[in-house]
Image (cartoon, rainbow, N blue to C red):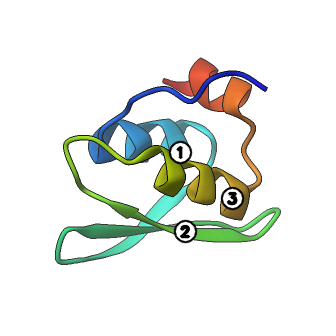
Amino acid sequence: MSRLPQVSGAELVRALQNLGFVVKRQQGSHSILRRTDPFAQTVVPNHRQIDRGTLRAILRQTGVAVEDLLKAL
């Protein structure tokens, strides 16, 4: 497993959009992204730097591998 990158919330939203996710709505400083096939939904905080544990949880919820995220960045 590759090392997790340091990314901001905006960078993570763009990367997930490149992987097929769509921003469904935004509530405060959190964006809710959804993919229909296969179904996955996650919440991304719009912070300057996302904590590694939060990033790992988002990747686990969405089923995205670290390598795929690095390619999408």
Q: Is residue 55 left or right of residue 12?
A: right
Which residue does the numbered mark 2 point to in the structure image? 42
Whether tag 3 and tag 1 are in contact, CB under 8 A, the answer is: yes
| Mark 3: secondary structure | helix
Q: Position of residue 22 (x, y in %)?
A: 50, 59
Of callouts 1 and 2, the N-terminal one: 1
Q: Position of residue 43 (x, y in %)?
A: 45, 69
| Mark 2: secondary structure | strand
Whether tag 2 and tag 3 are in contact, CB under 8 A, the answer is: yes
- Kind of residue sitting beneath label 2: Thr
At 71% from the left and 24% from the top, the residue drawn is 67
Measured in 3D between alpha carbons, the distance from the residue under mark 2 to the one under mark 3, in whole angstroms, is 7 Å
Which residue does the numbered mark 1 point to in the structure image? 16
Which residue does the numbered mark 3 point to in the structure image? 62
- Kind of residue sitting beneath label 1: Leu
Relative to 18, say whether 41 is above or below: below
Relative to 22, say whether 55 is above or below: above
Of callouts 3 and 1, the N-terminal one: 1
- Kind of residue sitting beneath label 3: Thr
| Mark 1: secondary structure | helix
